[in-house]
């Protein structure tokens, strides 16, 4: 099975609580841009664009911090996606400038001003239209036998952890342990795909690709501070990036527990630990296992409030299993990219926070 052979194979349309399902193939007109409110709501359409890179460029273009941009979720890069975005305190005079902004693979449609920003996870979910490639006959039969509603383990997908040798959850663990030097080392080594030594001559001559601008900024900070201020270097990164690393550790812990207790948690919700983890759950063997893992990693719930970096994660509840609904087969064909195999186009809805890649992997096991 191969998905995302090209961006058009993976279409993600956000199903919002404010405006219903967004349509990737539609151009959006303003609703009301005259009203006085703090947040400008926009429709963001992307094709083969990494979200954080776009936000960084867009913020720089408008001359303000990335923290003023809010999304309900980070969509896949190798995909065609559409979602809501809000911009905090953007004056009406700048609307024309927004509409003139050019970024390859991006279309941005201002809709209206609102008193409420877009919050992480506020959407109902996402509607996917996916072309699955390199399928054998038995895989095709499996897909055609699936019902319209399917229960599957609600694992976090690879997008949450990264696909390099060093996973983002490992960086998150180092941050939670206040191991600043180790966290920086992991971030830079993952960007370069090589080991580094802060004390070596080679460290002062490292080269980063243009796409690794956060890591390059971190590296430049260290050079200007003689390679020793690791906490300061981490502070030079956007808080959203640092928060992502901590969330990644929480996600890794969730996956670990669901996998270990897969036969017992189909109807359960798992409490992912955070700084207010103590006292708000009943003690059971799943919670006991979570505490054991935290203890093994040298982490306590209070560590999820990282004052030194200005980030915190209070913990959250996530269903161990999720439901895919409205599953249907659109088309089956011979796969031109992979001769001798089939490709099947499918569509389905997943609730917010669930991963299409995980769902497809589970149903085709």
Image (spheres, rainbow, N blue to C red):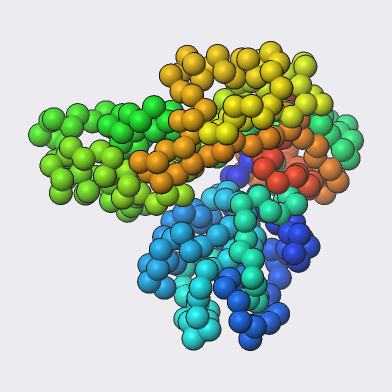
At 88% from the left and 40% from the top, the residue drawn is 148
At 73% from the left and 33% from the top, the residue drawn is 319
- The percent coordinates of residue 85 (x first, y second) are 59, 63
The number of discs equals: 0
At 41% from the left and 63% from the top, the residue drawn is 65
Left or right relative to 339: residue 219? left
Left or right relative to 274: residue 212? left
- The percent coordinates of residue 3 (x first, y second) are 63, 41
Say which quarter of the image contains residue 139. Answer: top right
The reply to whether residue 362 is in sight is: no
At 18% from the left and 32% from the top, the residue drawn is 198
Using the image as rendered, state which of residue 33 and residue 208 is in the foreground. Answer: 33
- The percent coordinates of residue 137 (x first, y second) are 78, 29
Say which quarter of the image contains residue 361. Answer: top right
Left or right relative to 227: residue 259? right
Q: The C terminus appears in which quarter of the rendering?
A: top right
Say which quarter of the image contains residue 158. Answer: top right
- Indicate whether 158 appears above or below 33: above
- The percent coordinates of residue 185 (x first, y second) are 29, 32
The reply to whether residue 111 is in sight is: yes
- Indicate whether 353 appears above or below 176: below
């Amino acid at each position: 099975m191969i998905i995302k052979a090209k961006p058009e194979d993976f279409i993600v349309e956000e199903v919002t609580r404010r405006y219903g399902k967004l349509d990737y193939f539609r151009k959006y007109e303003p609703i009301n841009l005259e009203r006085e409110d703090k947040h400008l709501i926009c429709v963001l359409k992307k094709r083969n664009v990494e979200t954080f890179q776009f936000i960084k460029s867009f913020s720089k273009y408008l001359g303000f911090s990335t923290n003023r941009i809010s999304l309900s979720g980070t969509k896949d890069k190798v995909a065609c996606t559409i979602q809501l975005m809000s911009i905090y305190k953007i004056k009406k005079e700048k609307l024309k400038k927004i509409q003139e902004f050019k970024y390859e693979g991006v279309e941005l449609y201002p809709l209206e001003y609102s008193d409420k920003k877009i919050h992480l996870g506020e959407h109902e979910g996402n509607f996917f239209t996916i072309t699955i490639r390199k399928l054998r006959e038995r895989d095709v039969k499996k897909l055609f036998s699936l019902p319209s509603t399917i229960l599957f383990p609600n694992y976090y997908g690879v997008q949450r952890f990264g696909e390099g040798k060093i996973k983002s959850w490992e960086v998150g663990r180092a941050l939670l342990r206040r191991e600043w030097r180790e966290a920086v080392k992991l971030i830079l080594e993952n960007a370069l795909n090589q080991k580094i030594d802060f004390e070596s001559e080679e460290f002062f001559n490292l080269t980063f690709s243009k796409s690794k601008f956060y890591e390059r900024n971190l590296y430049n900070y260290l050079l200007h501070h003689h390679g020793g201020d690791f906490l300061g270097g981490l502070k030079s990164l956007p808080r959203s990036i640092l928060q992502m690393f901590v969330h990644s550790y929480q996600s890794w812990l969730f996956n670990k527990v669901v996998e270990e207790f897969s036969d017992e948690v189909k109807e359960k919700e798992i409490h992912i630990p955070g700084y207010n983890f103590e006292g708000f759950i009943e003690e059971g063997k799943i919670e006991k296992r979570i505490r054991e893992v935290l203890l093994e990693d040298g982490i306590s719930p209070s560590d999820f409030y990282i004052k030194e970096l200005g980030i915190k994660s209070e913990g959250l509840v996530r269903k161990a299993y999720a439901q895919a609904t409205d599953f249907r087969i659109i088309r089956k064909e011979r796969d031109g990219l992979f001769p001798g195999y089939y490709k099947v186009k499918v569509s389905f809805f997943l609730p917010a926070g669930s991963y299409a890649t995980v769902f497809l992997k589970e149903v085709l096991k």
